[in-house]
Amino acid sequence: MVPHGQYPLNGTVWTVQDSTYVHEGIPTVAIVLTIIFVWFCLLGLLFLLMKERRYSGFVSVSVTGPGLYHTVQFPPGPQSGSWAAQMVSQARAMAAVAPPV
């Protein structure tokens, strides 16, 4: 079942594409705190050890079949790629055992 109608599960092909990028860097607040506290003691330099991870991109899931093409994109995250791959694996298993219409 997709937003534009119902289609038989038999004969569908499911694909997942993980286009997630992870950017890791020092957050702005760590730099500001380092500048403030380095004047009082050198322990302020420990703020530079803070790390921040940002996820960008998307995870795309597509299904094609007789008269059907549908794709959906999910936001990126630390677990979204593996979650989508697991769901597509279950859909492929159901499509493999689905009776022909």
Image: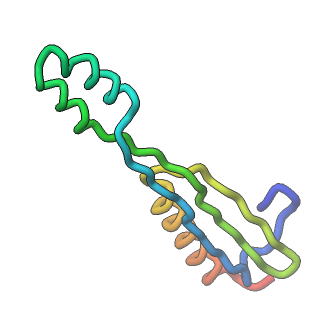
Task: Give the residue displayed 61% in from the left and 83% down from the top.
Answer: 96
Question: Of 98 and 21, which appears nearest the observer?
Answer: 21
Relative to 6, 11 lies left or right: left
Vertical side of 42 occupied by 80: above or below: below
State the image quarter where residue 100 is shown: bottom right
Task: Give the residue displayed 38% in from the left and 34% down from the top.
Answer: 27
- Quadrant location of the C terminus? bottom right
User: Horizontal and vertical percent for residue 49?
Assistant: 23, 38
State the image quarter where residue 97 is shown: bottom right
Relative to 8, 62 lies left or right: left
User: Horizontal and vertical percent for residue 86?
Assistant: 49, 66
Vertical side of 7 occupied by 75: above or below: above
Colour convention of the picture: rainbow
User: Horizontal and vertical percent for residue 20?
Assistant: 52, 59
Residue at the outermost front position: 39
Vertical side of 92 occupied by 42: above or below: above
Residue at the outermost top position: 40
Task: Give the residue displayed 76% in from the left and 76% down from the top.
Answer: 64
Question: Of 11 and 39, which appears nearest the observer?
Answer: 39
Question: Of 48 and 1, which appears nearest the observer?
Answer: 48
Task: Give the residue displayed 83% in from the left and 73% down from the top.
Answer: 68
Vertical side of 9 occupied by 57: above or below: above
State the image quarter where residue 1 is shown: bottom right
Q: How many marks?
A: 0
User: Horizontal and vertical percent for residue 57?
Assistant: 58, 55
